[in-house]
Each structure stands twice: as C-alpha cells, then as structure tokens.
C-alpha cells in the first residue's frame, strides 16, 4: 500500500487485500534503553551529554510502516525526570506515548522504567473528501470505520527529549520508517545515507536554563559547534586550506571523528537529513552536486532540484544525490547557519567516492552557505515545496481559524516569548490526565485568545511589552478543520524579527501559504493560499515579519503541543497546547499520568 | 522543662505543669519556600547554586522547642526532583517528613508543592530505665503513655537536600531550636553567633555525579573553597600579609563578602557551628581565644575547653567564647581542612571587637589548622566529648549487634563504597511507602549481613575487591536496643584509610566508644566502651583503620537512613537503611509516596 495516495485508501475501502498483507507483515519491534548522563566529546571538547545505552546520539530506530515500536526506557539520570518525543509520529490511539512532559505524560522519574508503545506511522484520513468516502461505504462513524480510513506512512523521523532543554543536552536519535515489504517509494535509489544534524553548546543545559530564566535575562549566545551525526569540529576546520585563518583539525578520537559518507560513482543515493538543533537554522550543500528534494517531514513532495537545502529545527527531508562528478575526488558536505548572524563555523563531512581513501581531503573548497540573512533564498526554497501527486488535498474550508501572534515580551524582569500575549508555562500535572479526569482545578478556566488585534504593528517592538503566563490550551472540537495563522512580529529590540520553526504534535498540517507583514485575512491574503497542492508537514517556519497559514483536521483525540522548535524559545514560553476530544481517548496507562493531581485523583478512586 | 534531664521526665510523669506550659507556648511556624537554580558567587566565582527564595544559603529557621514547623516547598527546578532533610530532627510520628528521597518520600517533582510538617524537636525516652519508669506510672504501653515519656530538645541543627548530590549544590541552611519560653540552657551567654560551614566545588554536581559514576571512575578532587555562611575566598586570602605567596583578596561584592562576627569586649558568646560540607572534614579556631564546648548535635555535653574544634560533615556544636583579648584588635576565625591532604585554602572570618571597624584586619596571623593527619589531635578532641550530667544513660545491654564493615570496592569497572560488601543503591519506590503497603516486589528478600568476617584484615586493601549493589535494609524490632559497630578498613590503595562521619536519621545514638584496628568484641574491646556518660549524637566519626561503637533504641517507627555524610561517599553507596516498626507508622500523606510501585498500589485500591 504505497501512500499517502488516494488509491491506497480506496484499496482499504474495498477488498483491502494490500492492507491485510500489511497487517500480516507488521512487526513488534522491541528496544530496551537506559538513559544516563555521560562524558562525551561531540566536538573534541569533553562535556556531559545525555546518552542512550552509552551512545550519543541515541541508537537509530529502523522499522517498516505499520510496525509497533516498544521502547522500554529506564531513566538512569541521577535526579532528573525524562521523556522521549517521537517527532513526526502521529500516535493515533496512543496520545500518552507522545513523550511531552506535563502534556502527554508525567516525566519518568530516576530509576523508573516506562514503556512507550506506538505504531509507525499510521495516519487517519483527515480530509472531508476522504471521510465522506469512508462514511458513504461504512455508514455511521465508528472506531471500526475510522480504522478503514487510515493508511501507513513511511518516512524520515527522529526522536528527542521533551523535558526542560534535554534535547540540547544530546538526547536525540534517528527514527527511520521504511515502506512495508513489497511496496515501493515513488522514486528510485541505489543506496542510503543518514544525516542527523544538531548544534552543540559547551555550557550545560542546566546553566542555560538558569540563564534564560534569570532576572536580568541572560542570552545563551550561539552554539559552539554544529554536529553531523553527533560529531563536530570546534576551533579548527577540516578544510583549513580553504578557510582563511582556520587551523587544520588534528587527528581525533572516535567520538568526534569526521563523518564520512562512502558512495560509489554513478549511483543515486537517498540522503535523509533531519535537524534537531537547539537554536540554529541550517543550510546543507554538497560540493558540485545537485540535490533533488523528494520528502519533507515524512511526506513525499513534488521532486525539485536545488544546490542546497534550508533545514530548520524540527524539519526532516530526503534528497536524492547522484554521484556524477569526477570520481577521483572526494567532496565536502557543508552545513552552515542561516537566519542568525552566524558565529558558529560550518560542520563538514566527506562525501567519499570509493575507492578513494576516506581521509583524502576534497580538492574543492566546501560549498559556501548562503548569506545568513538572504531570506529571499530561504523563501524560494520553502515556497517551492509542494505535495507529491496523490497527496490528499486539504478540506476546502475551515471550521475555525486561530491566529497566533508571536511576540517577545517582558514579565517581571524576565524575557519571554508569548502567543497572543500569553507565555506558556507547563503545569505540574500533565494535561492528558487532568483533562481526561476532568480535573478543573489544574487548569485555568479562561480560554486563550483566538486572535490578536488587527491593528497590531508587526514592524515595531510591542507597544505593550508586558506579558503574562498561562496554560494556553485550545480545545478543538472533534473532526473539525482548523486553520492556524502564525504571525511573526518585531522582537523587543528594533529592527529584529527571528525565524521560528513551529512543530505540531499528533498531526501533519497542510502548509497553505506564507506572506510578508501582517496577515489581514483579506482577499489578497486568501489569494496567497494554495489549496491545490499544499505540502503536508509537521513543522513550518515563519519568516521574519511574516505569516504562515496552516490547516489540519482535529481528528486525533489527545493533547498535542504546538510550539517553536527552538529549544530556548520553547523554554521561554513559545508554544500552545491543543486538546482534542480527550473524552474519546482510549485506555491510558496509569503510569503515564501517575503524578500530581492525576495521581491524587486516581488514588482517591477516580478512573481513567 | 529543661531537658534532656531526667528531672524533666519526672515532671512529665507527675503533674507535668511545665509540660502543659510548653504545650500552650508551642507555636506553628509557617514557611513558604521556592527552590530554584540561580547564579551565585559563593567564592566570587559565579556558578549555579540551588537557592531557596533567591537566597544562598537557604533562610535560617528559628523556632522554640515544641513548635511545629510547616514548610510549604515548591520545586521550581526545571527537571530535577528535590527533598529537604531536617538534619538532627527525630521526626517522631512524621517519618514521611524526614526528607530522604527514595527512603522516606518520593522526590518532589518540578512545579509541585509539598508541605513538610514536624515538631522541633520531640524526643522519646529511649532507655529501659525511663520506659520502665513510665510504665510503672502509666501501666500498659499506649500512645498516650509514650507521649508522657517524651521531652523537648532545643539545639543547633541544619537542613539540606538529600537527593543525588544536591546538598553539594548549596541546598542547605540553619535550623536553630531555642529552649521553650521561660526555660534556661545549662550555661549562660550574652550573645549568639551562627556559622554554617560548607565546602564548594566549581564543577556542577551533575558533572560530579557523572564523574563518580563513570567507568573508569573519576575522582572529583578536593573542593575549590571552604565557605562560612555561604561565603568564601577563591585564589586569594584575606590574610595575605600572613600567608606566603597569597594574593590579598580585593574588595568584593555582597555574595562573597567576608563574614564579620561583631562582638563586644568582655562578653560571652554562644557560637553555633554546623558543617554541611560535601567532602571536607574541618577544624575551627579563633586567634587567641579559647572555646568551651557545650553542645554537640543538639545535646548538651560536659563542658570542656579547647583551642580548636574538629567538625565533620553532619556535626553541629555550640561553643562558648569569651571576648577577653585585647579589644583594640580584631581576630581571625579560621576554618581549615583535616583528615585529607588539604588542597583547599582555609576560610577566614573576622571576629570584630566593636567599636573597631569591621574592615580592620587582625594584627595576628590566622590560627594554624592542626596538621591534616594529626589523628591523635582529632581523637583527643572527639574522645573528650561526654554527656552533660542528667543526659539519659544508655540501656546497659543491647538486644542485637550489627557490625558494619566499610570498604572501598570495585564493581564492573566502577568504584564503590560498600557495607559488609554491599553497596547501597536506592530504589525507585521509597521504602516507607513500599514497606507500609507490604509491597514485597520492590525490595530484595535477602537480608543484609549482620557482621563481617572476624578474620578480615583492616590494614590491607580488600582481599576480594569486588562488591555487589543492594537494598541494605535492616529491619529492627520495635523498642529493641541495637548496637552498631562501624568498622573502618584500608581502601583500595595500600596505606589509605579515610575518615567517615556516619549520620543516623530518626535518632540520636550513644557513642559508646572508639578503638584502633579491628573490632573483636572481646573483653579488651568491651573495656573501651563507656556506659556511664557516653554522649548522645546523631553523627559519629570512624577514624582511619578504627572502629566506633554506637547504641540506640529502635523506638521510632519509620524508615531511617544511616550513612556516611560525605556526599560523594554516599553517592558511591556508603550507607544502609533501618526499617523500624513500619506497621506502627501513622497516617502518611499520600503525596509523600505518590510515585513508583506505591502510587500503582494506591491507584489499584491499596490503603496506606
């Protein structure tokens, strides 16, 4: 069942032979992880990282679409809780396994073991067209009906910590979902390479969190290094011959050895690239090679060819690369910073044309990263991303529109990021448990604002720079279609507006369009929306001073975070929470909500 | 009711007018604390500390004996649990408030609030003589009878974190209990000074914990500074004129300003001194002044005069100081390292004879700390401590003797401290809850060893250097008298044996005696025991290659840690747990045990 293609849904709705085949082939895949702090030298400077089973980055999970992943996770940190978010996985029926502390579950305490269980990656039909199709065949909506309106989705995903800033401490790894046995991708390749990109600070996340929470506020600055598969070079360059003033990196130990990507000449490779950076927006290019973009966030896209790709924190892509260059040479893979004045040197890897030696330095200079503030370049890339033929189109209209203004604010001497002037603070008791039990006391009764003032001047610092903190829970009616307009604005300082990649849990959304300046919802703005072939994604960027319009169907009962994927921005409150049909959520393991007010209620006889 | 004097018990047993008076005067004292990480410069180098209400050290709690302390504690750390142990407070009837993570309660999760409630400091009669007296008057034992066999105990205490190595991150403060109104101490003084001593590392506790848990093991080294009331001098000396090679400390900001103790000439001051060091054993001396020791660990002692006092981590003392020296001068208070080759400069404070200026440097050099390995000096001080007249004597015989051999061992590439060859690892579910609910699955069934081999050669590294980890829970029968012999030995390296101050929760013990070499329990060893006037304490040291014999009555239902108070040693497993009559423990707040297997059991309908 090659999907997300309408044909497959039809298959499911009819005899569904392919589907039965998938079900038979689906496997349970068991992993046993222990999470602990350990010394590691990601960029040859020894620091403390959070590792999994003694590895950094964590082990790659590889599965086939439809498989069920079981991760039995022991927290071996000394005093810190931990959770793991499976970024891009929809968690249909298992919202308690989404791994967001204080939202979908209680942080797992030290010495405790918690088992995540979820399917990779089942998608519900979300368009009215498809739902109508289903209902026409199956009659009244029921769980069984919904089962028939689902498909499986292979893709490039990753996982990471989602408590405090633990992702920035190195708690992440790759999660790659292959097509089901016998199925084919809509493109061909001879081999595969995997690049998990991140950035790295020498200061501990504890100190970073204190700095960001301090009064007066202290900014943590730019990362010391960029990492490719957990390896980087600090204060030296592998390409010093081409980099004025740089020192050539010495031979290094295993932990920070440069990444080598071995390839054969005249073959096509699928390069999977995902970014779990804390702060940096990245650009990836490979000397002399073109890249054909074929997948974004687990969704096939209309293929297009570029020299380089922008990749924001939370994004994942597959690009095809043909090794059609002079085979006597190796080539640099270069990853540099976009969107902020770069103070971090590019990370380099070697595309190693075999049988050249892996240590043979490329003859050409590493490809230059486009200027950090060349937003036209960024927009050209981002706007070019369109859905692959056969991707379900969005419902033609939305039932509700939520406009979220992103501002930087002050609160009691702190600096915060706010959404419609509320900065998100997570509660002691996770939303999933407290909403399922109806514990009104744990949440503020007030509903967050649905939109911001039409007159808001996004080109200036906020007229009222003061903000408040709150829950920011938007309750979405089941199966309604929701539009979200993310509106960027000027930060506290004049002439400053940052890039923010927003990531939605529990869903893909259609990215309907982008615009510069304030969104007004007028005919001109409407004309910018693409209802024909908008890409499905789980992460979308808002450009400085601009807006981004998204659409999704609230068809996944659970409580889902929606937030800027920049770790310090999230820490400073840049997020909201969507609660969807929590009454329809099935069995939640008690252990997932065994803390705070939920634990008290359950001990007093309440039932989940 | 001046106590612990037998007369007071008699008072209680008869009309108990005084006792009623106390009860009337007793107050509830409410504190609201928020615990968070913050930047601080304890020794003028800025680091992250754990503070309380923005203060480091935490606020001093001051109360009268018999008062009930309520501390409503909000954990505002980002991802770490927290607990507070009230060091030296017996927690009669409130074992859940002892503040030991994984023993008496679940760590309080971030954003949660937990309220500690306990009386300072009620003591049960513990000698058979007194219990017999009580029973003779009151008949059958009952809760009411036991109430009449109690007294109140003022004294010098402190509090600190007891989860991971959070104490070493600065989570501590003073807890001072005055006599009840109208009562008098058995000594006179005109004023009072308080010194809370600690040591300070520049490396974070997270890195320290990783180092100690690493394979290969990494020792954390000696602290960078010693602190007096949270203030120290790193890389400079306030007395550089007297310290060859030292740089005079510059004028400093408030956080690391030197401590000044203002006094009037020809008065007597009570100097309260407590040590919450992570590693260092200390010695305190004041230039030209004699010190009269009058209290140790909240118990009055037979007064004696010394030039300096040794103070181990976990100890507290009161000493009287008479300002009988040349009043035109100020004098140095000097705190230096004992028991380990000192690599940390002494901490200095100024005894400021008013009306001299506080900044007038003392004319004399700071008193020299005795040589770190002059154990004869240490033993002379420690052995001299005897009970104050009227302190209850110990029961003449014990019902059980537990001999605990302290060894340093290897385990799977790690280095551990072990007791009778088991290194303590704490469980996910606190003992108090799991034992009260009878959750057998959470504890190993095997009982730890009651003694070690008589042939063990304490002068050599362990013949079998390998150890295991375990629960180390000793179940003590209610109201039995227990002797504990702590036996020191050679560590893994030849010719090395360290000082270990052991601290018992929930009790004072009588320190019956000390000896060099292996304890054999023979007539010669018995002859070394003092049954006449042994001091009551909660912390006792074992000297290198020596033993220390303690006695206490297991009359306090609860689960109590007993461990080396050196933070890295405890982290490396140097402790055991005593479980006493957990079936007699009264109501335990559910929140205290709302984690792990206890939470599961309570959610499944079990009752505490």
Image (cartoon, coloured by chain):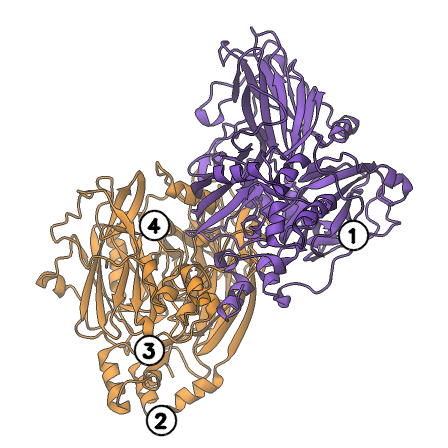
Chain colours: A orange, B purple
Q: Is residue B473 above or below residue B530?
A: below
Q: Give the labeled residue for mark 4.
A: A569
Q: CA distance from mark 4 to mark 2?
A: 48 Å
Q: Is residue B63 left or right of residue A535?
A: right
Tell me the residue that label 1 is attached to.
B400
Q: Are marks 1 and 3 in contact (CB under 8 Å)?
A: no
Q: Which residue is mark 2?
A: A15
Chain designation of label 3: A
Which residue is the site of mark 3?
Answer: A124
Residue B90: % across, % down? 60, 44
Q: Is disc 4 on the same chain as disc 1?
A: no
Number of the front mark, 1 or 4: 1
Pick the quarter of the image with the C terminus of chain A.
Answer: bottom left
Q: Position of residue A36 (x, y in %)?
A: 56, 55
Question: Circle 4 marks a residue in which chain?
Answer: A
Whether discs 4 and 3 lie on one chain: the answer is yes
Of residues B484 and B101, which is closer to you in this image?
B484
Dot 1 alpha-carbon crowd within 10 angstroms: few under 14, some 14 to 19, many 20 or more: some
Cα separation, mark 4 vs mark 3, equals 31 Å
Q: Is residue A117 above or below residue A569?
A: below
């Amino acid at each position: 069942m090659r999907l997300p293609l309408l044909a497959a849904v039809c298959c499911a709705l009819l005899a569904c032979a392919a589907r039965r085949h998938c079900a038979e082939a689906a496997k349970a895949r068991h992993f046993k992880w222990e999470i602990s702090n350990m010394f590691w030298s990601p960029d040859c400077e020894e620091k403390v990282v959070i590792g999994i089973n003694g590895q950094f980055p964590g082990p790659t999970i590889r599965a086939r679409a439809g498989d069920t992943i079981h991760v039995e996770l022991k927290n071996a940190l000394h005093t810190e809780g931990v959770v793991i978010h499976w970024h891009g996985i929809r968690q249909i029926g298992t919202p308690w396994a989404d791994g967001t502390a204080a939202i979908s579950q209680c942080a797992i305490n030290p010495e405790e073991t918690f088992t995540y269980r979820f399917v990779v990656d089942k998608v519900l039909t979300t368009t009215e067209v498809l739902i109508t199709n289903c209902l026409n065949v199956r009659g009244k909506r029921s769980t069984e009906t919904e089962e028939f309106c689902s498909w499986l989705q292979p893709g490039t995903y990753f996982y990471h910590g989602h408590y405090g800033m633990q992702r920035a401490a190195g708690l992440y790894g790759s999660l790659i979902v292959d097509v089901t046995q016998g199925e084919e991708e809509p493109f061909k390749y001879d081999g595969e390479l995997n690049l998990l990109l991140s950035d790295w600070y020498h200061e501990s996340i504890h100190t970073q969190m204190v700095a960001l929470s301090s009064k007066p506020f202290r900014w943590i600055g730019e990362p010391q290094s960029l990492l490719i598969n957990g390896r980087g070079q600090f204060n030296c360059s592998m390409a010093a011959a081409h980099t004025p003033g740089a020192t050539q990196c010495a031979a290094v130990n295993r932990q920070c050895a440069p990444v080598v990507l071995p390839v054969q000449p005249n073959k096509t490779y699928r390069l999977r690239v995902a970014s779990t950076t804390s702060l940096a927006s990245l650009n990836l290019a490979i000397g002399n090679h073109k890249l054909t973009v074929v997948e974004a966030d687990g969704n096939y896209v209309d293929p297009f060819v570029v020299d380089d790709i922008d990749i924001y924190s939370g994004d994942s892509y597959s690009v095809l690369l043909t090794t059609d260059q002079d085979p006597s040479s190796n080539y640099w893979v270069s990853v540099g910073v976009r969107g902020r004045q770069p103070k971090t040197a590019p990370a380099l890897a070697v595309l190693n044309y075999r049988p050249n030696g892996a240590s043979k330095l490329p003859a050409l200079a590493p490809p230059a990263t486009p200027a950090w503030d060349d937003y036209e370049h960024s927009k050209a890339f981002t706007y070019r991303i369109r859905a692959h033929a056969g991707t379900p189109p969005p419902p033609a209209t939305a039932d509700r529109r939520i406009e979220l203004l992103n501002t930087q604010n002050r609160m009691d001497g702190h600096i915060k990021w706010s959404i419609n002037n509320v900065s998100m603070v997570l509660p002691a008791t996770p939303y999933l448990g407290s909403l399922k039990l109806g514990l009104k006391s744990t949440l503020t009764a007030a509903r967050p604002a649905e939109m911001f003032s039409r007159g808001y001047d996004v080109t200036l610092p906020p007229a009222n720079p003061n903000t408040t903190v709150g829950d920011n829970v938007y309750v979405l009616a089941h199966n309604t279609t929701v539009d979200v307009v993310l509106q960027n604005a000027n930060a506290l300082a004049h002439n400053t507006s940052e890039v923010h990649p927003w990531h939605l849990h529990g869903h893909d959304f259609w990215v309907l369009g982008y615009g510069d300046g304030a969104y007004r919802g007028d005919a001109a703005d409407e004309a910018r929306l693409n209802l024909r072939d908008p890409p499905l994604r789980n992460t979308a960027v808002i450009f400085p001073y601009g807006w981004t319009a998204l659409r999704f169907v609230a068809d996944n009962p659970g409580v889902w975070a929606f937030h800027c994927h920049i770790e310090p921005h999230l820490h400073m409150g840049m997020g909201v929470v969507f609660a969807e049909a929590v009454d329809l959520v099935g069995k939640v393991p008690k252990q997932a909500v065994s803390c705070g007010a939920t634990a008290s209620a359950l001990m007093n006889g309440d039932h989940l």
